[in-house]
Structures are given as structure tokens and as C-alpha cells.
Image (cartoon, rainbow, N blue to C red):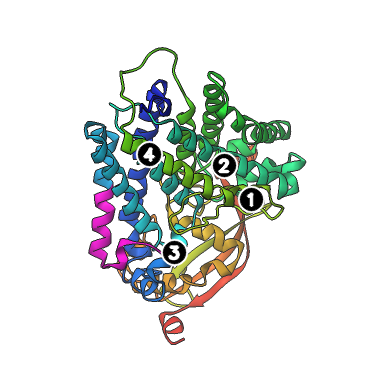
Amino acid sequence: MTWDWLALPDYWYARLAVTRLLAVVYLLAFLSAALQFRGLLGSRGLTPIPRFLARVPWRRSPSLFHLHYSDRAFAGVAWTGVVLSALAVLGLPDLLPLGGWLGYWALLWVLYLSIVNVGQIWYSFGWESLLLEAGFLAVFLGPAHLAPPAPVVWLLCWLVFRVEFGAGLIKLRGDPVWRDLTALHYHHETQPMPGPLSRRFHLLPGRLHRVEVLANHAAQLVVPFGLFAPQPVATIAAGIIVVTQLWLVLSGNFAWLNALTITLALAAVAPVGGGPVTAAPPTWFAVLLLVLTAGFVVLSYWPVRNMLGRGQVMNRSFNKLHLGNTYGAFGSITRTRYELVVEGAPGEDGPWREYEFKGKPGDPRRRPPQVAPYHLRLDWQFWFLALSPTYGRGWLPRFLVALLRGDRHVLRLLRGNPFPDDPPGAVRIRMYRYRFADRAEHRATGAHWVRHEVGEFVPPTTLDDLTSR
């Protein structure tokens, strides 16, 4: 029996693009873990992994770290992931036989799954599950000498369909500003991590903002169906998704969400003209592909039910392997931007000096930096914290203690340390209302933001205050 009907030789470019770009995203994800984990998750971090492992069993968080955890072991896993990802960017897995390909990409997936499942609040973002689901499917794409498997190509298209269509549905069902086309009057200014061009996008005329919203609805609610159409319609649909994602890249910082969505959209691209000669899948691999497809058909029940149900939720994993997830973004839009400014002083009476973060707004004169596709996890959590103090319940006191003790691993998560010689004697957090400077204000002062203090989030606090509780 031949298995030619499971092969899509014309999609050789799709596989090449998806695997190489996915390797880039893996590289960024592992690098982010390696550079940030000690302050966030290390044995003395803000939410220590050993404490998490002591109370959460393996069945609730499958991870290699249940076998053994140390900061050195975590660093080993993260840096191993960096090296393997970099080699995958260069195409090493394509030189391996089919079994070697499967093992290589499966190892990348297991390593990152092990990190995400102990990452707690710092790894609670939808793009973590998206990377794991995409990475799992990539295991079965096969090396360059094998024809791209049709089931995996369609499952990748199904994945990007869920990302886009789920995001479109949650917008229409959620905040009314998406329905009256005014969402982008606010979003560019209040998004979690504005970028260098976000202020310019915000200052566009209201008429253009409404066009942006309409284009977004079309790209997320209509275009994704084209991914399953015959060529060249599928390629055109993929191109529209890529363009809209690049628009989002220009207008803000969303870690690797946009890069990964672009990567998945390219699975639908089939170039005109012949490609390299490839072989049909061997029987054992064809059977494996059919089992994979059946498994994802079953797993799709939960995200489909979620999308079609009235109580749709965003970014939910229905199992601990992060497969068959539901996705979505910005079902509600924040109207006013609040920022938390962390300050330290030699004593409770001041003088106070501000801690600057790498990505989130602080100094009004500082232009928002380009951070994406890298992910600054502490900065993102401070955006959530400004929305509600409950987001910091498990880690904010430990963060303040780390500042008061001059913890070098936590301080490395910040842009700079205003107390390079001795730690401060007291810290506090003030809340400000931020808005983008208009053109006249920017010309007069050079500032990108205008801010006004609205209250005290954490009063002046010393180490004794925090350690005596």
C-alpha cells in the first residue's frame, strides 16, 4: 500500500518556513527562560520552583523538574534548548533520518513543556501554549527528504484558524468598543507594552482607527476560512494574516505572539512551480500521522465548544500538555492607562529614586522601546498589577524584599539600579495615570508620555515591615 495521498510535495516551502521560524521562536523562548528565571523562579526567586513542586504533583504539571530541580538544572535545560533551537534554525534536523527528526523536535517540546509547567504566573500567557502546540505538531512535519505530511499541514492551518477566529469572536462578544469601532481610540495607548511607534498609531485620526478595527474584524473572522480553500486562495489568505500581524508588530510589543502567528500562517503557502523531489511517508509514519490526526480531532471538541458557546474564554489549555487549546486576545479594552512606579530611598522620608524597567513605561521622556519578540515577564505582570492588586498577591512582597536586600538576580530584571552601592532603606509604589503626549506637548518638552499621580499603591515600607509579618 502506498501513502502518496498523505503527502503534499508542493508544500515544501511551507515546511521550510514553519520549521525555521518556529526554531527562532523556540530560541527566543529558551533564551528568555535562561536569562530571567533566577529572579523569577529560582530557588530564591519571587515564586520559587521548589516551593511549587512541593505542593503540585506531576500529574497536574508534567515536567522533568519533578525528577530533580536545582537552579543549575533549570539553567542546563534552558541553555540546552537555546543550543538545539539555534542548530534547528541552521537546518540541522533536516540532515537527520526521520527518527532523528522526530526525536530532535520532541526533545525541544519536552524541554519547553517542562519549563512552562513550573513557570506559574510568569508563564500564564497564551503564546506559551501556542508555542507548545505548534512545537508538538512540528515533530511530525518530517525532514526535507520526506514530502510534507498533509495531516500536519492541515492541523497547523487549523491551529492558526483557532488563533485568529477565536480572537475575532471574543472581541465581538466582549467589549462594545469593538462593535462600535472605537476600540483603537484607546488600545494603542493602554496596551500592555507600547512600542516605539505606538504613540504615532494612537494619534492617527479617529476615522483611520475605525478602518483599523474593520480590517481587524475581516482578518480574524472572514480570512481564516480561506486557509482551507484551494490554492491560490489559501496562500492569499495566509498573506493577509501575515500583513495584519506585521501591522501589530509595528504598533506594539506582544512578545512572540505575532511572530508565531505569522509562522503558522505560512503553513498554508504553496509556491507556484516545482520543488525538491521528496518521498512519500513510510508505513509506520503514515499510521502515526493518522493516529495524530484522530487525537487532534478529539482534542478539538473543547476549543470548538468554547468558541461556539456563549461563555467563550480566552487562552485556555484544557490539558496539561497544552494541546488543543483555545486562544484569543483583548476581549476587553482598557480605557485609561495606569502605571505603577517603584521607588526607593535611604529612609522612609526620602529622597526617593525611581526604578526603571526595561520595557514598561516609566520616565515620560523615554521613548517606548522595541522589545518583541522577546518577552519581559516582570514588566508584563506589572501591567496586570496596575489593573488589580490581586495579580501581585503571590510575588509582590518578595519583589519588594528583593529590592531592599539588593538581590542581584531580581535587579537584573530591571533597566538599572538607582542604588548601586547600598540597597535602599525603604521602598514604595505610586500609581500614575499615563497618556501619550500630543504633538504640541511632544514638541515643547520632548516627552512621549504625560503622567499625573493618582495615589499610593504601596506606602513607604522597610525590610522590617515585610519580614516581621
Q: Which residue is mark 4?
A: 287
**Who is closer to the viewer here, 279 or 394?**
279
* Residues marked 1 and 2 touching at CB (< 8 Å): no
User: Of the residues tagged 3 and 4, which is closer to the observer?
Assistant: 4
Q: Which residue corresponds to the image point at 53% horizontal and 18% vertical from the top-left?
A: 232
Q: Which residue is mark 1?
A: 305
Which stretch appears magenta? Answer: 61-81
Q: Which residue is mark 3?
A: 120
| Quarter of the image with the N terminus in it | top left
User: Of the residues tagged 4 and 2, which is closer to the observer?
Assistant: 4
Q: Position of residue 9 (x, y in %)?
A: 38, 22
Upstream in sequence: badge 2 or badge 3: 3
Q: Position of residue 348 (x, y in %)?
A: 47, 78
Q: Secondary structure beneath disc 1?
A: helix
Q: Where on the picture, by quarter, is residue 468?
A: bottom left
What is the three-letter code of the residue carrying label 2? Arg
